[in-house]
Image: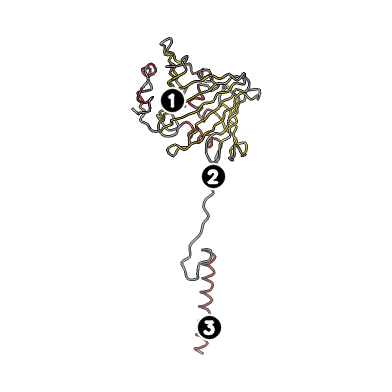
Amino acid sequence: MNSIRIAIATALFAAAMTLTGVANAQTTGGEAPGTTARVVTEAPATAAPTAEGIMKQAHMNLFYPADNGRAVVHMDLTDKRGKTRTRDFIMLRLDVEDGGEQKYYTWFTGPSDVKRTSFMVWKDPMKDDSRWIYIPALDLVKRISANDKASSFVGSDFSYEDVSGRHWSDDDHKLLREEERDGEMAWVIESTPKEKDSFAKKISWVGKDRKLVLREEYYDDKDELERVFTAAGFVDIDGILTVTKRTMTNEKKKHTTVVEFSEVTYNVGIKDEIFTERYLKSPPKALLEGEGS
């Protein structure tokens, strides 16, 4: 009798161990029986990016790389007859607040008709930008009205606002679709100004890999294409993907401006004191020569 009881107990113990092994295998994805059970949970799904979030990141990458920066800039302006004029200048940038206030200083080195002209902007997303231009022929520093933000920057197809960048919070954004642009998948986003502005809507292609704007189209209130912006020449500089070629075309005037950046450097010790009326007339030579301050 005892032997029968022992056999039954042994069988029950074996069955229990078998069930435990099955439970462990189901819980851990196939671990050996007798090992400690681990609960496997799926990673939470990443939230899909919003249109505003995409535009914010693209804006930050283009206009707020590092804390400050310097670049040598060459500009070609070509009219509908194919005649080209040039502009050469050095641009300095200082971020007062990441994604917020910024200051820009631009000193023209040629040609002779614009040489020694300088331009300065204090950018504040919470209010109108402050802009000044120094005209050497008149030895005059002129304050540029905030209402002139859509005016041409030194005769180019870029506006004053284009130089320092239109803040993403000025517009409402809607994700239209995803499609390939210049060999890269891109988000296509429609932006409409929150208040009446110089354009009625803007369509942007933002690269999903580069997180930078590849193309922008500006439309008027009749839904007619006015201007087209394209970015090219993507170069890694100190770990920062940098756009070294920007083109703006006025579709109605058949006029194009190409801007190329060289000698781009970041975190070069630019100080706030540079962005004053004093330096509009007399530039900080050390920084303009790329030696820091």
The mark tally for this picture is 3
Q: Earlier in the sequence, mark 3 or mark 2?
A: 3
Q: Residue furthest bottom?
A: 1
> Which residue does the numbered mark 1 point to in the structure image?
91
Q: Is residue 74 above or below residue 3?
A: above
Q: CA distance from mark 3 to mark 2?
A: 56 Å
Instruction: For the residues labelled 3 and 2, say whether their Cβ atoms are less than 8 Å apart.
Output: no
In the image: residue 176, left or right of residue 18? right
Residue at x 48%, y 62% (from the top left corner):
38
**Amino acid identity at mark 3:** Ile
Residue at x 47%, y 71% (from the top left corner):
34
Q: Is residue 156 above or below residue 213?
A: above
Instruction: Indicate the position of residue 86 as horizontal and vertical percent values.
Output: 51, 20
Mark 2 neighbour density, 10 Å: few (under 14) some (14–19) many (20 or more): few
> Which residue does the numbered mark 2 point to in the structure image?
47
Instruction: Indicate the position of residue 240 as horizontal and vertical percent values.
Output: 45, 37
Locate residue 278: give its quadrant: top left
Q: CA distance from mark 2 to mark 1?
A: 38 Å
> Which residue does the numbered mark 3 point to in the structure image?
8
Residue 249 can be seen in this image: yes
**Amino acid identity at mark 1:** Met
Q: Nearer the viewer, residue 179 or 191?
A: 179
**Amino acid identity at mark 2:** Ala
